[in-house]
Amino acid sequence: MRVEHHWWNGDVRVARRDVYVRTDGEQWEVEAQMGGPLGKSKVQQCPGKASALILADAWRGPRWQWREI
């Protein structure tokens, strides 16, 4: 799967959050990662790009100032 979008909350400590939207051209998934690469993550399959972007937006939430990488 390739990363279509990657957002980061700008925190480099334990509060780091990343949200990824990935696709292989047919399947779409969203991953929310907490605490950096060694932290916890949750992956959700989505039926298409639109639903993946909606979910990614919901998982980011308004708490931090997100940056797309």
Image: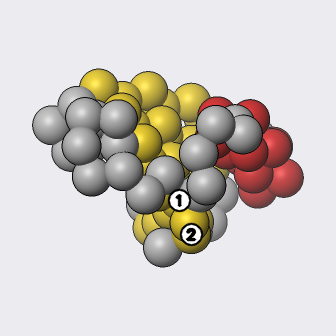
Amino acid beneath label 2: Glu
Q: Quadrant of residue 30?
A: top right
Q: Most extreme residue toward the left, as rendered?
A: 38
Q: Secondary structure at mark 1?
A: strand
Amino acid beneath label 1: Trp
Pointer 2 and pointer 1: residues touching (CB < 8 Å)? yes
Dot 2 or dot 1: first in sequence order is 1
Q: Quadrant of residue 45?
A: top right
Q: Which residue is drawn at the image coordinates 25% and 34% (left, top)?
A: 14
Q: Residue 7 bears which disc, if any?
A: 1
Q: Is residue 57 above or below residue 21?
A: above
Whole-percent x and y of residue 5?
Answer: 57, 66
Q: Quadrant of residue 57?
A: top right
Q: Which residue is mark 2?
A: 68
How many numbered circles are shown?
A: 2
Residue 42 at least partly seen: yes
Q: Nearer the viewer, residue 5 or 69?
A: 69
Q: Is residue 56 above or below residue 45?
A: below
Q: Which residue is drawn at the image coordinates 45% and 67% (left, top)?
A: 2
